[in-house]
């Protein structure tokens, strides 16, 4: 019988819980929290292909930091064990009373350019347990029909370079994953709508 552990009992490096991807994801959030504290900014996990209705719903939480994982590209010199640049998507949502304040912001609420700039300086070049952070792109997402004209979404592509397991750790994790207790339950969570707290 396969045992399913609660999410908070998965070790960060547990293979089934995401391993180094989860460690990097949590590390990025830790860096962001230094500049965007939870007392002022909401954090959400943003899934790919969310519906327009869900985007509109989470936009109500602005100012908000949305986080997602995009890809894991192998390094040219990875060798026997997979290593590569793990790429994460960040979505910085800002809201203003007047649309003309969305870019520069006001004295009381940040704008898109301010959020993008602060997040870039907060992340780029920083060291995490898994590797070094590199901001690959920062853009002002055009989201016609998703959100109203008083909300802007800054999208960022952020890589944690040369991320991977150590060989010893990977061997131990694979052995555990292939055991009865190491897999998944395959029971779907039918409550989630595509966005959750990061």
Image (cartoon, rainbow, N blue to C red):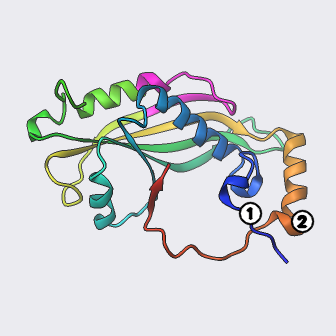
The extreme front residue here reads 39
Please indicate whether residue 27 sits to the left or right of residue 118 in the image. right
Q: Residue at x 69, y 30 (%)?
A: 129
Task: Point out the frontmost of discs 2 and 1.
Answer: 1
Circle 2 residue? 179
- Tell me the element at label 2: loop
In the displayed structure, 103 sits above or below 5; it is above
Q: Residue at x 40, y 35 (%)?
A: 137
> Is residue 24 magenta-colored?
no
Callout 1 environment at 10 Å: few (<14), some (14 to 19), or many (20+)? Answer: few
Q: Which mark is residue 49?
A: none
Q: Which mark is residue 5?
A: 1
In the displayed structure, 22 sits above or below 183; it is above
Image quadrant assignment for residue 113: top left
Q: Which residues are magenta?
A: 120-136
Numbered disc total: 2
Residue 82 in percent (x, y) is at: 76, 45
Image quadrant assignment for residue 181: bottom right
Do labels 2 and 1 touch, CB within 8 Å?
no
Residue 74 in view in this figure: no
In the displayed structure, 197 sits above or below 187; it is above
Residue 74 in percent (x, y) is at: 67, 43
Q: Residue at x 74, y 69 (%)?
A: 184
Taking depth in this image into account, of 10 and 50 the one nearest to the observer is: 10
If you read the primary sequence from the N terminus, does the residue marked by circle 2 or circle 1 appear first?
Answer: 1
């Amino acid at each position: 019988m396969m045992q399913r552990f609660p999410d908070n009992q998965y070790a960060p490096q547990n293979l089934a819980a995401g391993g180094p991807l989860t460690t990097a994801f949590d590390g990025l959030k830790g860096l962001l929290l230094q500049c965007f504290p939870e007392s002022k900014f909401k954090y959400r996990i943003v899934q790919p292909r969310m519906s327009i209705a869900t985007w509109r719903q989470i936009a109500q939480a602005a100012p908000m930091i949305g986080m997602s994982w995009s890809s894991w590209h192998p390094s040219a010199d990875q060798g026997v064990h997979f290593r590569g640049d793990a790429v994460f998507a960040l979505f910085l949502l800002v809201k203003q009373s007047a649309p003309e304040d969305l870019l520069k912001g006001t004295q009381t609420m940040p704008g898109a350019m301010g959020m993008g700039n602060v997040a870039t300086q907060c992340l780029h070049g920083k060291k995490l347990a898994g590797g070094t952070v590199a901001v690959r792109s920062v853009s002002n997402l055009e989201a016609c029909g998703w959100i109203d004209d008083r909300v802007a979404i800054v999208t960022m592509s952020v890589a944690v370079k040369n991320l991977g397991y150590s060989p010893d750790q990977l061997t131990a994790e694979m052995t555990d994953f292939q055991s009865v207790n190491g897999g998944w339950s395959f029971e779907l969570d039918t409550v989630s709508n595509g966005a959750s707290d990061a």
